Image: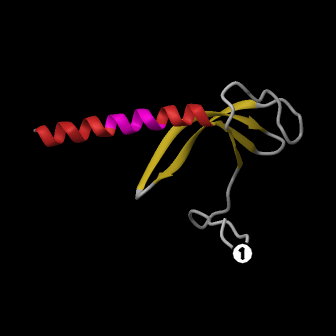
């Protein structure tokens, strides 16, 4: 957030879903933390900005509450996907350099 309390937004459209990142690897959400309804699964692309100027799109299955429009992502799973992507890119860079 910025100093005046306004969030920076990517693009001109308003967000379609609320997003929550679960930092606990041993905890899963079978119920919504806000309304206590059962959550389902929703597979949507997740766009992640990695410094300095990289965007990574993951087609990732997240927990979803229909009533709150809340998507819950699991931090350790997302980090695993990011490390796989970074190791693949490092291998591709090494192949380009050696060729």
- Asked which colour scheme the image uses, the reply is secondary structure
Question: Between residues 45 and 92, which one lies in front from this camera angle?
Answer: 92
Q: What percent of the width, then of the height, locates residue 75? A: 61, 37
Q: In percent of the image, x 60 and y 67: which residue is there? A: 12
Q: What percent of the width, then of the height, locates residue 94? A: 21, 38
Q: What percent of the width, then of the height, locates residue 15? A: 67, 57
The image quarter in which residue 62 lies: top right
Residue 33 in the figure: left or right of residue 53:
right
Q: Quadrant of the C terminus?
A: top left
Q: Main secondary structure of the magenta part?
A: helix
Does the stretch in magenta take in 83?
A: yes
Q: Which residue is mark 1?
A: 4
The image quarter in which residue 78 lies: top right
Secondary structure, mark 1, is loop
Does the stretch in magenta take in 62?
A: no
How many marks on residues? 1
Q: Which region shows up in magenta?
A: 82-88
Q: What percent of the width, then of the height, locates residue 40? A: 74, 29
Q: In percent of the image, x 66 and y 28: which residue is there? A: 25
């Amino acid at each position: 957030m910025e100093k005046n309390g306004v969030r920076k937004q990517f693009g001109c459209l308003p967000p379609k879903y609320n997003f929550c990142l679960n930092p606990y690897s041993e905890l899963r959400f079978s119920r919504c933390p806000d309304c206590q309804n059962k959550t389902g699964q929703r597979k949507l692309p997740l766009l992640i900005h990695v410094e300095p100027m990289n965007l990574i799109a993951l087609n990732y299955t997240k927990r979803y509450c229909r009533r709150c429009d809340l998507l819950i992502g699991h931090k350790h799973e997302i980090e695993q996907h990011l490390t796989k992507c970074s190791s693949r890119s490092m291998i591709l860079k090494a192949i380009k350099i050696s060729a």
